[in-house]
Image (tube, rainbow, N blue to C red):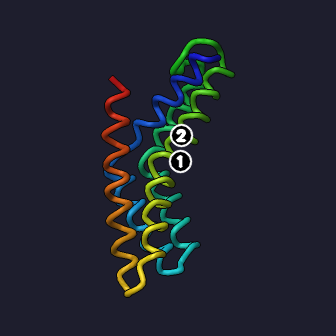
C-alpha cells in the first residue's frame, strides 16, 4: 500500500502545467476581486480539464481490472485518490492561494494583477519541480 501511495503522490505533482497556470491565475484574480464563488468554480473547472478527465479514464480502467499499480482494486483507488488530492492541492489550489494572499494585500486597485502574477509564478515553479520528480 505504501508503493501505491507513493505512486499517487508522484502522479499528483505532475499536474497539467498549462491549464493549472491559467486556472490558478484566473482564480486568484477573481478571489482578490471578491468573487470567491467564481474563483472556486474556475479552480474546479481547470482541474477537471487539466487532470480530472485523465483520472476518470484511469478510474474506469481500474474498475475493469487493469490499472496503474499491482495490489488489487484498493491499491488502485489509493493511487487515484492521492493523485487527485495532490494534483488539486499542489497544482491548482496552492498557487491560487499564494496569488490571492498577495492580491488581497495590494491597496491601490491592482490586486487582481498582483494575484495573477504570483499565481502564474508559483504554478510555473511547482510544475517544474514536479517534472523533476517524475523521471
* CB contact under 8 Å: marks 1 and 2: yes
Pinpoint residue 18: horizontal percent, then vertical percent: 31, 51
Q: Please tell me whether mark 1 sits on a helix, a strand or a loop.
A: helix
Residue under the image location 32 percent in, 65 percent down: 117
Q: Position of residue 74 (x, y in %)?
A: 69, 22
Quarter of the C terminus within the rendering:
top left
Visible residue check, residue 65:
yes
Left or right of residue 62, residue 33 in this image: left
Q: Is residue 132 left or right of residue 79?
A: left
Please tell me how crowded label 2 is: few (under 14), some (14-19), or many (20+) other residues with Cα within 10 Å.
many
| Residue 37 left/right relative to 125 | right
Q: Pointer 1: residues within 10 angstroms few (<14), some, or many (20+)?
A: some
Query: Distance of mark 1 from mark 2, alpha carbons?
Result: 5 Å
Q: Which mark is residue 8?
A: none
Q: Quadrant of residue 130?
A: top left
Q: Residue at x 45, y 44 (%)?
A: 51
Is residue 13 left or right of 66 when viewed as pictured? left
Residue tagged 2 = 86
Q: Position of residue 84 (x, y in %)?
A: 55, 40
- Vertical order, 7 against 72 (above or below): below
Q: Which mark is residue 89?
A: 1
Locate residue 6, reporting x and y percent: 54, 23
Amino acid at each position: 500500500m505504501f508503493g501505491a501511495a507513493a505512486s499517487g503522490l508522484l502522479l499528483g505533482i505532475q499536474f497539467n502545467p498549462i491549464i493549472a497556470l491559467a486556472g490558478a491565475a484566473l482564480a486568484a484574480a477573481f478571489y482578490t476581486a471578491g468573487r470567491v464563488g467564481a474563483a472556486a468554480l474556475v479552480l474546479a473547472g481547470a482541474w477537471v480539464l487539466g487532470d480530472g478527465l485523465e483520472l476518470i479514464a484511469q478510474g474506469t480502467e481500474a474498475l475493469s481490472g487493469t490499472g496503474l499499480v499491482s495490489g488489487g482494486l484498493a491499491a488502485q483507488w489509493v493511487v487515484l485518490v492521492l493523485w487527485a488530492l495532490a494534483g488539486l492541492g499542489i497544482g491548482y489550489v496552492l498557487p491560487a492561494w499564494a496569488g490571492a494572499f498577495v492580491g488581497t494585500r495590494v491597496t491601490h486597485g491592482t490586486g487582481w494583477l498582483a494575484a495573477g502574477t504570483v499565481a502564474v509564478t508559483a504554478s510555473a515553479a511547482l510544475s517544474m519541480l514536479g517534472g523533476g520528480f517524475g523521471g
